[in-house]
Amino acid sequence: MVYNAIIGLQRMLSPYGGGSSIEHRSRSSSRGETRTIRPVSRLEGDIILPGDKSISHRAIMLSSLAEGQARIGNSAPGGDCLSTVRCLTALGIRIVRTGSPEHPDFLVSGAGPDGLKEAADVLDAGNSATTVRLLSGLLVGRPFLSVITGDASLRGRPMGRLIEPLRLMGADVRGRGGDSFAPLVIKGARLHGIDFTLPVPSAQIKSAILLAGLFSRGRTIIHQPVPCRDHTERMLSSMGANLEMQGNSISLMPLGQPLVPLNLRVPGDISAAAYFLVAGAIHPNARMVMRDCGVNPTRTGIIDVLVAMGARLRIENQRLEAGEPLADIVVECSQLRGIEVGGDIVPRLIDEIPVLAVAGCVARGKTVIRDAAELRVKESDRIATVAGELSRLGARIEPLPDGMVIYGGDILEGAEVDSCSDHRLAMSLAIAGLVARGETTIRHAQAAQVSYPAFWRTLQQVGQDS
Ligand code: S3P
């Protein structure tokens, strides 16, 4: 069934040319919500980003363990963090939402280290792997039963890598498919610290172990072969946990005293900024400023790579808030050239590879992405889906087992593409549509809701037509 196609919305919104470009949507059962993108003559404006998703999940979870009320300002507004809120509420934590829909504040009444209560039903993490993995770490040491599930995509994502270290700590966790997938069944157990080397550079697994370590006997030590995002470590330290970093290793002692409640304003999400950084860099006529963007060095791989490709980016106003660095980032139109991306930088930009591939399509020469096999187990198999959907726009991309080769420099041609129900693919395809000839229609565009509900409106606002 198709209903309510808002034909010509762009013209209605902008009879004189400003703030137009995008839109025109419909919903049908087979195509979901569709968004049609048309090229614009200029991209310009100040962008207020949604709060960082990774930091928001952690702030909400750790605040539930603290004693007293926490205020988490500018929290991530998307469905993923709402999944975390929903699960913690089901575990007996009182969370009040205030602020605006796009920049919510959460007031979390921390119940102390022993405050979580058995949920009456299965916990639903929706599309959010961060929720299921971090929450598992939190729950394995609690004296009750928990069952955690999620949507079809999440139920297909690997959980063996989570179950294994938690079991080494004494946890009683089972998973579907021979302990490989969610739903997970967790029976609270007495835990002990471990000395563990992460087999994959996963911040979700590292964080799950640290959360379990808070309630374990003895010290927990984690070694990271390659450093990955360190928001959990920074936040635990700022809340008074006994945590030390030495090189790439982390050492954590169990909670001796309750965590101190947080009062923070979450920095803008650099993973959301990435769409506009690439858009500004590949568009022939662009200048945009991203305000208050998180620039934690474990997340800024996208900036380093874009600069190496020749992008004109400027970082201004650097400062620190609640242990996390933030800054304003200015991007202007540039001439990009292809580059090789691989090795230690990959965990610092893993979520940005879909949009980086769009930059590679426009750049002169070849862009090679390697050492990124993790892309295969994200919200979609992002090597297959990025290569497949960008190819529909005429891009020449050769998938590799652990990355892709992109032959850049061709002009993309608008076409109908599909988000494959992956938020990062939906938004990356929209950026490709901005520089493609003609119209690009994205099926299942509603996928963007889990991380960046205001994405389409922001894109519309910065697009200028003359
Ligand atoms: C995240 C860690 C990364 C990232 C994900 C968010 C986090 O996943 O891809 O979007 O908040 O810890 P992995 O830990 O699986 O690498």
Image (tube, rainbow, N blue to C red):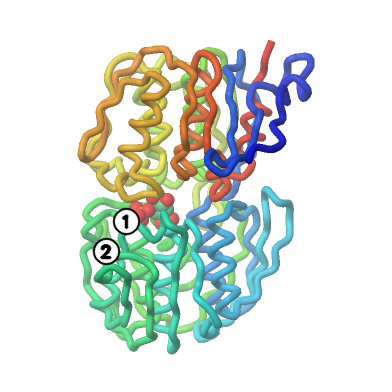
Q: Label 1, on which residue?
A: 202
Dot 1, how many residues are within 10 Å of its Cα: few (below 14), some (14-19), or many (20+)? some
Q: What residue is at 47 percent from the left and 25 percent from the top? A: 432
Residue 292 in view here: no
The picture places residue 17, in percent across and down from the top left corner, at 73, 15
Quadrant including the N terminus: top right
Residue 145 placement, left or right of 38? left
Quadrant including the C terminus: top right
Residue 217 placement, left or right of 282? left
Could you say whether the residue bearing mark 1 is in a helix, strand or loop?
A: loop
Could you say whether the residue bearing mark 2 is in a helix, strand or loop?
A: helix
The quadrant holding residue 362 is top left
* Of callouts 1 and 2, the N-terminal one: 2
The picture places residue 407, in percent across and down from the top left corner, at 29, 19
Q: Is the CB of mark 1 within 8 Å of ligand 1?
A: yes
Seen in the picture, residue 409 relative to 451 is either above or below; the reply is: above
Q: Label 2, on which residue?
A: 161
Q: What residue is at 42 percent from the left and 21 percent from the top? A: 393
Q: What residue is at 37 percent from the left and 67 percent from the top? A: 182
Q: Determine whether label 1 and label 2 are within 8 Å by CB.
A: yes
Dot 2, how many residues are within 10 Å of its Cα: few (below 14), some (14-19), or many (20+)? some
Residue type pointed to by label 1: Ser
The quadrant holding residue 338 is top left
